[in-house]
Amino acid sequence: MSERKLECEIVRDLLPLYHDDVVSEVTKAAVSEHLSECADCAVEFLKLRQELPEEKEVTPKKKFMRFMRNQKRMRILSSVLSVILVIGLLTGVYFLQLQFPVFEVPAEEYGAERIYRYETEEEYRYFVIVRAPHYDYMKMDTVGMEDGTLSVRILKPLLSRKSELMTHEAIFVIPGGYEMDGEIIVKREYDRVVCGETVWEAGMNDEVPEYVYEYDWYEQHGGGCTLDVENNLIGFDCADGMFRWWDLDGNELEGIPEE
């Protein structure tokens, strides 16, 4: 009894396809044989014929029309997917142009207030105070040249907005790293640093202020820091546990500078 019921369920699932004559010859013969023996399924098939338009014969023309309708659906689906893909691609490109900094800010728009080279046990380092207009998602980039020049650049996204009210002031400590001198590893030493309109060359600013060395400690240990280029001030937490102030020329200030 269970086999008969299962067989009927399968046949009833096939009735719409059987009605449209889109089943194989083997399936068609099996369903026809079942309908001749099973009154319940025969009644279901009669109901189906009343609900669906009957096609007494599937002619080549009708098969061709079905094929063309399917092709049309596929073309529509392909067009919709293509539009979605293009919209996604354009959206991605737009956000990359807004947030991915790859374009250099014109050199005449920024420069360095101070550039110092100093030596540690590990390497030469370059202390640079940069002042530049503020762009959304801007970043600093450095490139070492074979001619001994260190280029400090400001990059921005293509469609980044330039603020008319804000100025970007920042301190960067750039490690010189190492290079090979024959078979010997030596500290890399740049003789020229270019930051926008500012050019520093060896021999300039040879006297390195105390705050440069103190900032080296601060950068490794963290704490509070204030940079005010307009008022010629810099201050931060130092190794002695004190928050100390200097003017940018290196003169230490007593107490908290007045605004």
Image (spheres, rainbow, N blue to C red):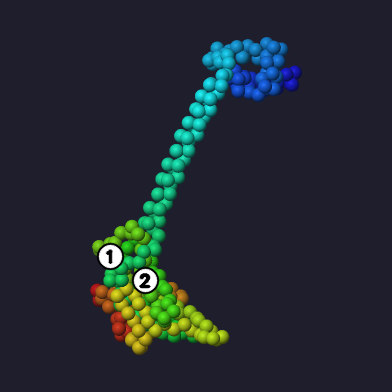
Q: Nearer the viewer, residue 54 or 197?
A: 54
Categorize mark 1 by other alpha carbons within 10 Å: few (<14), some (14-19), many (20+).
Answer: few
Label 2 sits on residue:
153
Query: What residue sits 42% from the left and 41% below the top?
Result: 83
Of labels 2 and 1, earlier in sequence is 2
Residue kind at label 1, given as amino acid type: Met
Q: Is residue 176 visible?
A: yes
The answer to which quarter of the image holds residue 2 is: top right
Residue kind at label 2, given as amino acid type: Arg
- Give the quarter of the figure containing the N terminus: top right
Query: What residue sits 35% from the left and 77% below the top?
Result: 194
Q: Are marks 2 and 1 in contact (CB under 8 Å)?
A: no
Q: Nearer the viewer, residue 31 or 165?
A: 31
Categorize mark 2 by other alpha carbons within 10 Å: few (<14), some (14-19), many (20+).
Answer: many
Residue 136: x percent and y percent?
Answer: 34, 61
Q: Which mark is residue 206?
A: none
14 on left or right of 178 = right
- Give the quarter of the figure containing the C terminus: bottom left
Q: Which mark is residue 166?
A: 1
The number of numbered badges drawn on the structure is 2
Q: Is residue 254 visible?
A: no
Query: What residue sits 50% from the left and 31% below the top?
Result: 71
SS for callout 1: strand
